Image (cartoon, rainbow, N blue to C red):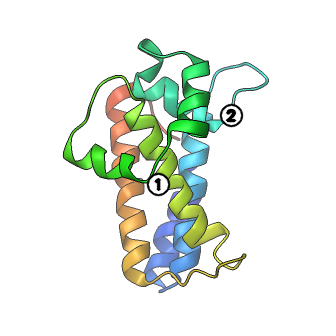
Amino acid sequence: MYDAYKSAIDAYTQGHSGSCIESCRTCIVSLFSKYKGTENFAKWMRGVYNTSGDNATATVTDLDKALKADLGKEDLADFFNENREGKLTKTKTIYMIYSMMSDYGTHRNENIIELPTIQDALFCLRLTDNILFWVYSRTNHNFS
């Protein structure tokens, strides 16, 4: 995870927007993979669910439904205006950030070509920073 974070910073300082965003995405996936649990079916998103505290009020079935059926474009706007309980809001928001980073980073040259700007890269880097700080504050773990 540290290598991906360092790569994101290096790519940003060198003006490589897409590579920066791609490394941010890798960093987030690596981070939450540490918290996914031991089940064979568990993926990195299970780590977000576990870390966010959503697992205290929702089941894994609720998580699956939230990501497959309930996730709408308005959810991110709702999150920034009001953080309502019971909707797996934090988990879905991180998934939406991951999806954006996929479109502008890892998959930027597939299907509809995305041309990320240096401002997009800085936005993604700042989101990554904030996610790292948030997880650290919730888990009190060292990320090394």
Q: Is residue 104 above or below residue 70?
A: below
The residue tagged 2 is 43
Q: Is residue 23 above or below residue 15?
A: above
8 and 39: which is toward the camera: 39
* Residue 134, x across and y down, in percent: 34, 39
Rendering quarter of residue 3:
bottom right
Q: Is residue 85 above or below residue 118?
A: above
* Residue 106, x across and y down, in percent: 65, 67
The residue tagged 1 is 97
Looking at the picture, which amino acid does disc 1 mark?
Answer: Ile
The local secondary structure at tag 2 comes to loop
Disc on res. 67: none
Residue 2 in view here: no
Residue ID at (48%, 18%): 55
Q: CA distance from mark 2 to mark 1?
A: 16 Å
Rendering quarter of residue 121:
bottom left
Crowding at mark 1 (Cα within 10 Å: few <14, some 14-19, many 20+):
some
Q: Of marks 2 and 1, which one's residue comes earlier in the chain?
A: 2
Q: Is residue 113 above or below residue 89?
A: below
Is disc 2 in contact with disc 1, using a CB cutoff of under 8 Å?
A: no
The local secondary structure at tag 1 comes to helix
Looking at the picture, which amino acid does disc 2 mark?
Answer: Lys
* Residue 41, x across and y down, in percent: 76, 26
